[in-house]
């Protein structure tokens, strides 16, 4: 299927963790457990923002170890980290849900024939976990979702968004991206994405307020101004 080119938004690409699912605290818990065990010092909040959120597992672990790692070591640490993460998710059933307004937005976009996809730094076991918990296949083609396959370059490289747009047959310049991280903003900009909307449940807009690449900053999807779709 060829890519569509027009001035309107034809495709929406969602980041997942911290965007469709408010789970940043769970990921921080898991990565701090890993970093504490390796270097006797958990990742700082600044490290979490710069080197963890939005990044692939390989990117995070190579930052932690300060050198390239083998696939075997990567798989071993990812398994440990994801077990910490999933346990934390399942122990908090009240918050085990998609962000407010997400489902309604999916249904609206599908009715408008706007194609949707996910580009996530999660690896396949987590993606399967999310599919089971949230029924993502109701709205998304699992074969088109872009995830960390241990080979794709991590955000802020544009690769995930370029592949996600290509998989739904829409030019990146006709896509809108929902993100929650600095690395995600840079990745979307590098991919030539038309509009970037930031999800920040804290309501603190100071981190992104003066960023010219950000079209909107919202606390959840009920606050999304759909008029920007064109």
Image: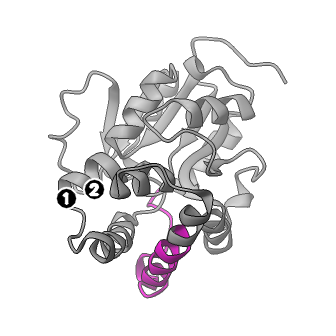
Residue 203 x %, y %: 21, 51
Determine whether, in the image, residue 102 is placed left or right of residue 5.
left
Residue 14 x %, y %: 53, 44
What range is drawn magenta here?
Answer: 78-101
| Direction top: furthest residue | 6
Residue 175 x %, y %: 56, 26
Q: Please state which of residues 125 and 195 is positioned toward the viewer in this rendering.
A: 125
Tell me the quarter of the picture where residue 212 sits: top left
The answer to whether residue 56 shows anywhere in this view is no
| Direction bottom: furthest residue | 91
Residue at 20% in and 70% down = 41
Q: What whole-number distance in Å separates the C-alpha atoms at marks 2 and 1?
A: 5 Å
Residue at 38% in and 30% down = 186
Find numbered disc 1 in the image and state the secondary structure of the residue it sits on: helix
Question: Which label is found at residue 45?
Answer: 1
**91 drawn magenta:** yes
Q: Which residue lies under the disc numbered 2?
A: 48
Dominant secondary-structure state across the stretch colored magenta: helix
**40 drawn magenta:** no
Q: Please state which of residues 51 and 93 is positioned toward the viewer in this rendering.
A: 51
| Direction right: furthest residue | 1
Find numbered disc 2 in the image and state the secondary structure of the residue it sits on: helix
Tell me if mark 2 has few (under 14), some (14-19) or many (20+) residues whose alpha carbon lies within 10 angstroms of its own: some
Tell me if mark 1 has few (under 14), some (14-19) or many (20+) residues whose alpha carbon lies within 10 angstroms of its own: few
Tell me the quarter of the picture where residue 119 sits: top right
Instruction: Give the quadrant of the N terminus.
Output: top right
Tell me: residue 203, above or below residue 175.
Answer: below
Tell me: residue 8, above or below residue 63.
Answer: above
Is there CB contact under 8 Å for labels 2 and 1?
Answer: yes
């Amino acid at each position: 299927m060829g890519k569509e080119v027009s001035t309107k938004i034809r495709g929406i690409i969602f980041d997942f963790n911290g965007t469709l699912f408010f789970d940043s605290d769970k990921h921080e818990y898991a990565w701090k457990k890993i970093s504490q065990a390796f270097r006797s010092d958990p990742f700082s909040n600044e490290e979490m923002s710069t080197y963890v959120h939005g990044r692939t597992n390989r990117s995070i672990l190579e930052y932690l170890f300060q050198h390239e790692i083998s696939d075997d070591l990567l798989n071993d640490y990812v398994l440990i980290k994801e077990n910490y993460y999933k346990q934390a998710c399942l122990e908090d059933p009240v918050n085990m849900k998609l962000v407010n307004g997400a489902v309604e937005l999916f249904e609206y976009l599908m009715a408008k024939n706007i194609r949707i996809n996910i580009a996530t730094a999660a690896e396949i076991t987590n993606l399967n976990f999310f599919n089971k918990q949230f029924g993502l296949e109701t709205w998304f083609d699992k074969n088109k979702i872009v995830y960390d396959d241990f080979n794709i370059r991590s955000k802020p490289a544009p690769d995930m968004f370029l592949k996600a747009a290509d998989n739904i047959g829409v030019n990146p310049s006709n896509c809108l991206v929902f993100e929650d991280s600095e690395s995600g903003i840079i990745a979307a900009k590098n991919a030539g994405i038309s509009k970037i909307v930031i999800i920040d449940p804290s309501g603190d807009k100071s981190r992104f307020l003066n960023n010219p690449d950000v079209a909107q900053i919202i606390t959840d999807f009920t606050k999304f101004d759909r008029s920007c779709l064109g």
